[in-house]
Amino acid sequence: MAETQLKDDRDIRLREAEHPQSLVVRFGAEKPLKLDAGVELAPFQIAYQTYGTLNAERSNAVLICHALTGDQHVANIHPVTGKPGWWETMVGPGKPIDTERYFVICPNVVGGCMGTTGPASINPATGAVFGLEFPVITIRDMVRAQAMLLDHLGIEMLFSVAGGSMGGMQVLQWAASYPERVFSALPIAAATRHSAQNIAFHEVGRQAVMADPDWRGGRYFAEGTNPRRGLAVARMGAHITYLSDAALHRKFGRKFQDRENPTFSFDADFQVESYLRYQGITFVERFDANSYLYLTRAMDYFDLAGDYGGVAANAFKGTPTRFCVISFTSDWLFPTPESRAIVHALNAGAARVSFAEIETDKGHDAFLLEEPELFAIVRGFLESAGRARGIPPGRT
Amino acid sequence: MLTRLQRDRTMEETPRAPTGARVDHLVVAQMVEPRSRVLDVGCGDGELLKLLEARGVDGRGIELSREGVNECVAKGLAVIQGDADTDLANYPDDAFDYVILSQTLQATLRPRAVLEHMLRIGSHAVVSFPNFGHWRIRLALLFGGQMPTTANLPETWYDTPNIHFCTIKDFRHLCEVAGAKMEKAVALNAWGSPLRLNAPWWFWNLMGEQAVFLLSRNR
C-alpha cells in the first residue's frame, strides 16, 4: 500500500509541475529568464491564478506574492489537498483585497512545484526531471519572471503588490526593481534581508532533507523514491518558527494526545508532537523536497541593502510607491525591528509609508490567520490608495 | 512619552468649530499652505491629518501608540508607529514643508532636540501646546499648593505623560536657543477663541490656555 501511495504522490507532483490545474503562460527560447546566477532559464513556464476582472483602464491589478510553502491557489480550493485557498480570509468578494474591485493575480514562483518551472519540472535538455540541475534562483529572479507575466497580460502598472514573509520579500523587490510599475505595496511580516538566525533555520531544514537516504542526491524522481521523512522533519522544524511560545502553549500546553498518562516511549504522547507530525506528513503530500531547498536558498540570498551599495534606503530612493508595512508582536522569525528597518529605509527616501504592528500571540503565521485588525488596515490602506488611483469604491 | 491618542481622548471636551473640527486643529491647519508636504509628529487618531488631507495636503504621521497608528492606517492615512524622541533622526533634511507637533511637546523627553529635528526635517515647524502660564494654573498652584489639574490637563502629576510643561514665555526662550524664527503665533483662551493679536506677550502668557506657533529655520 505504501508503494501505491508513493506512486500516486509522485504522479500528482509530476503532473502539477508540468500540467498544473491553473492558467499557464509558456515563454519560449526567444524569451529567456535571465537569472542572478548568471545563466538563462529557457524555455520556462509560469502557472498562475486570477480572480476578478481587469478594468478597461487596466488600473486595478493586484499581484499577490506567495510565501515559501504557498502557491498560486490563494482563494480557490487547492487541487491537490482539497483545502481552501491559503489567503481566503484576505482575498475574495467583499474581502479586504476585494475581487469585486480588483483583478487579483497570483503566480507560482520560479523554483516552485505547482506548475511554474522548478526543480520538479522536466529539463528540456535531458527530458528528465531537473532535480539539482535546476539553477539556483533568487527573489529577484522570481520578480523578474512575474514582470514577464505582467508584460504578457498587458499590465503596465500594478495597483498593488501584496505578500507576507517570502511574499513580502518579493513585494520589496518589486518596489525596488520596478518602482514605476508599483502604485502601492504591502510587505507583511517581511525584512530587507534574511537574518543569520533565519539562514541557520533554513540550513537545518535543508540538511534534514539531504540526510534522508531517499533524497538520493536530489535524484529521487529518477530512482523512484521520495525523501518524505527528511522533508517532514524540515517542515516540523520550520513550523515551530512560524508560531510562538504563547500560541503553542495556548493551543496545546502539556496536554497528552488521546491518553491519560505518558506511555514511557517515544510515541507522540503530547498533543504538540502529534500536531507537528501531522504538519510534516501533510506537507510532503503537496510539496517537492528539492523545491524546498531552492526556495529556502532564495530567501537566504535576499539582501536588498547588499544589492544597493550596502544601504537599503538606496533601493527606494525617490520611490513613487505608497507603502503599508505590517508586522506582528509575537513574530520572532521576522520580528518588528525588521519591519522597522524597512520603514527607516523608506523614510530616508521620504516615501509615503504607513507602518502598523499588530498585537497577536500567533507568531509569524498571523498574516495567514483571522486577524481583524490586519484586515481593517489592509482594507483602509487599499481604499485610500484606490481613491488616489481613481478606482471606484467597493460595496460598503 | 505620551501618546497623543491618550491626549486626544482626554480632549474630547475641547472647543470645536461648527464643522466639528477642533479649534486648535483649525488654527494649525490655517498655518499650513495647501498642497504642501506635512509630517504630523504624534498624530493621535489622525483627526488633524484628515483635516489637512481634506485641504489637499500630502500628510504623513508618527504616533507612539499602536492603537492610534492602526486606527490611522485603517483610515488610509500614511502613519507609522514611532517615537518623536528617537525616530525623527531617521528622516532626511528638508523632507517636508511643515513638521507639526500638536499638543505633544510637553510630553517629549528632550523638547529642544525634538524642535531642532523638526526644523531640520521641515522648512517650517508648527507647535501647539498647553500654556502652563495660564492664570488658572498660576492661581491653582498659588492657592492650592499642588500641581494643578484642569479640564484640558486632567491627570495628576504622577500619572501625567506631560513631563515638560512650559509657558508661552518659556517656549519663546526655547525658540531662541534652538535657532527658530517665529513667523506667527496664536494664543487661544479657554473657549478656544484667539486672543487679541496686538496684545503684549505677558497678556497672552496669562490669558492663553493654549498657544500655536509657526516657526522657520533662523539660519
Image: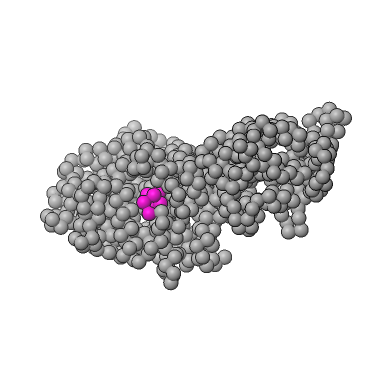
Residue at 21 percent of width and 54 percent of height: A41
Residue at 47 percent of width and 60 percent of height: A97
Quadrant in which the C terminus of chain A is drawn:
bottom right
User: Which of the two residues, A224 or A115, is positioned nearer the viewer here?
Assistant: A115
User: Which of the two residues, B136 or A234, is positioned nearer the viewer here?
Assistant: B136
- Where residue A152 sits: x, y (%)? 31, 65
* Residue B140 lies in quadrant: top right
- Where residue A232 sits: x, y (%)? 29, 44
- Where residue A316 sits: x, y (%)? 43, 47
Residue at 80 percent of width and 46 percent of height: B197
* Residue A267 lies in quadrant: top left
Horizontal placement of A254 versus B69: left or right?
left
A228 to B132, vertically: above or below: below
Which portion, as a residue range, is magenta?
A172-178
Horizontal placement of A326 versus A31: left or right?
right
A111 to A267, vertically: above or below: below
A68 to B137, vertically: above or below: below
